Amino acid sequence: MKMVLLLTGLLSSSVVLADEYDKGRRLAFDRNRGNCLACHMMAGGESPGNVAPPLVVMKQRFPDKAMLREQIWDATIKNQNTVMPPYGRHGVLTIDEIDDVVDFVYSL
Ligand code: HEC
């Protein structure tokens, strides 16, 4: 019985790990939602555009995760003339969805 519980625990924790960034990835890649691939190359994404920097080694480029969140929430804070949509400010993504996308992007 203990063994079964242990196995169940192991299995469910590995499922959680495998799915950790799924929500954010789906939102980022969805052409009708984040659509980040229209402009950014992102690992695992197909047919990326190249008008924006590839999203790689994000932890090194954004030691402060809050700055990454701010960029995605409202890119115009940093650059008034950016073509990047202000996902949070315009309500393109909800607060929870922004957090999911930030977590995913931070894993790249
Ligand atoms: C219409 C094009 C476009 C879309 C769509 C877009 N971005 Fe951007 N993004 C840009 C551009 C251009 C920049 C370069 C900085 C600037 O314009 O100020 C940028 C910059 C960034 C940066 C900062 C990169 C760095 O190294 O400084 C991040 C992070 C980012 N985008 C994430 C995202 C995410 C996540 C999405 C989707 C939810 C997204 N972007 C959608 C155009 C876009």
Image (cartoon, grey):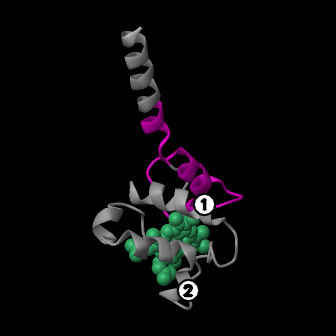
Please report the residue visible at 38 percent of the width from the left and 69 percent of the height from the top. 65
Where is residue 34, by image quadrant?
bottom right
In which quadrant will I find the N terminus? top left
The answer to whether residue 30 is above or below residue 82 is above
Q: Which residue is mark 1?
A: 96
Q: Quadrant of the C terminus?
A: bottom left
- Asked whether residue 41 is in view, the answer is no
The residue segment tinted magenta is 15-44
Q: Residues within 10 Å of mark 1 (few under 14, many from 20)?
A: few
In what element is the residue under mark 2?
helix
Residue at horizontal 61 percent and vertical 54 percent from the top: 27
Task: Determine the residue positioned at 71% across, 58% down.
Answer: 32
Query: Dot 2, how many residues are within 10 Å of its Cα: few (below 14), some (14-19), or many (20+)?
Result: some
Q: Among all residues in the image, which is located at the extreme top?
A: 1
Q: Position of residue 74 (x, y in %)?
A: 57, 79
Please report whichever mark, 1 or 2, sits nearer to the chain's N-terminal start.
2
For the point 32% across and 61% down, the residue is 57
Q: Is residue 43 above or below residue 52?
A: above
Residue 56, given in percent of the width and then of the height, sits at 36, 60
Measured as percent of width and height from the top left, residue 62 is found at: 34, 71
Disc number for residue 6: none
* Amino acid under disc 2: Thr
- Gap between marks 1 and 2, in whole Å? 20 Å
Spot the residue most to the front. 2
Q: Three-letter amino acid code at disc 1?
A: Asp
